[in-house]
Image (tube, helix red, strand yellow):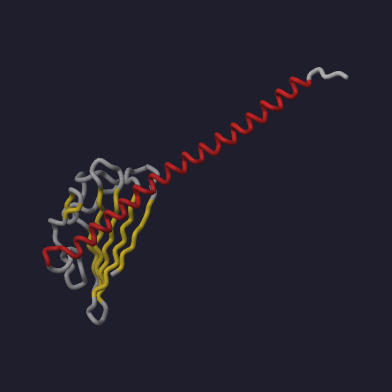
Amino acid sequence: MNNRGFTIFFATLVASLALAIGLGIYDVVVRQLGLSTTVSQSQYAIYAADSGAECALYWDSKYGGSGSAFATSSASNPPTSGIVCGSYDMAAAGTPPVPFATQPTGWTPWSVVSTANAATTTFTLTFPGYSYCAVVEVGKTTDVSGTVQTIAYSHGFNTCVPGATQLERELKITY
């Protein structure tokens, strides 16, 4: 019986099998690293959205002990300063320029759009030393009975740096 070459064939077979297993493990590790990066960036986005929502809730209920800091259909002139979240005055500098720049470069007062029975105040909340941010829209609607309903949307982003890959998470608050 001639077994010449069997050892080389068997060694090649075992090496190929080990290589296939190694490549499979490598593929799983690379995918898991990508997923863990996405998850951590997603956390930044949801934390930013939560911070924006908390800022809106605080100033909607605590402004000067009376009323809201945000525009309503009957009070469409909200304050122009003194609404501070983090270290920035949202009323004085709550709208970033296009393209986005960190505060205070090019920022303008928050945006207010009002109609006969509704008003929406929009501002951007940034976090000094970090690239994430939140864009918050606080809408107030007055129904026919005079009841004011508030809907706040807080869009959190893992980064507000132009050209970077953004993840967005949104929180909606209705009361």
Q: Residue furthest left?
A: 64
Q: Nearer the viewer, residue 153 or 110?
A: 153
Q: Residue at x 51, y 40 (%)?
A: 31
Q: Quadrant of residue 111?
A: bottom left
- Residue 141 position within the rendered picture, expressed as x and y whole percent measured from the top left: 26, 72
In this view, 3 is above or below 160 = above
Quadrant of the rendering where the N terminus is positioned: top right
Q: Nearer the viewer, residue 24 or 86?
A: 24
Kindly tell me whether residue 48 is visible in this rendering. yes
Kindly tell me whether residue 117 is visible in this rendering. no
Q: Give the left or right position of residue 171, taking residue 82 as reference.
A: right
In this view, 61 is above or below 164 = below
- Residue 45 position within the rendered picture, expressed as x and y whole percent measured from the top left: 35, 50
Q: Residue at x 18, y 66 (%)?
A: 68
Q: Residue at x 16, y 63 (%)?
A: 62
Quadrant of the rendering where the C terminus is positioned: bottom left
Q: Residue furthest bottom?
A: 145
Q: Quadrant of residue 163?
A: top left
- Residue 114 position within the rendered picture, expressed as x and y whole percent measured from the top left: 23, 68
- Residue 108 position within the rendered picture, expressed as x and y whole percent measured from the top left: 20, 52
Q: Nearer the viewer, residue 164 or 37?
A: 37
Q: Nearer the viewer, residue 32 or 79?
A: 32
Q: How many marks?
A: 0
Q: Residue at x 24, y 56 (%)?
A: 123
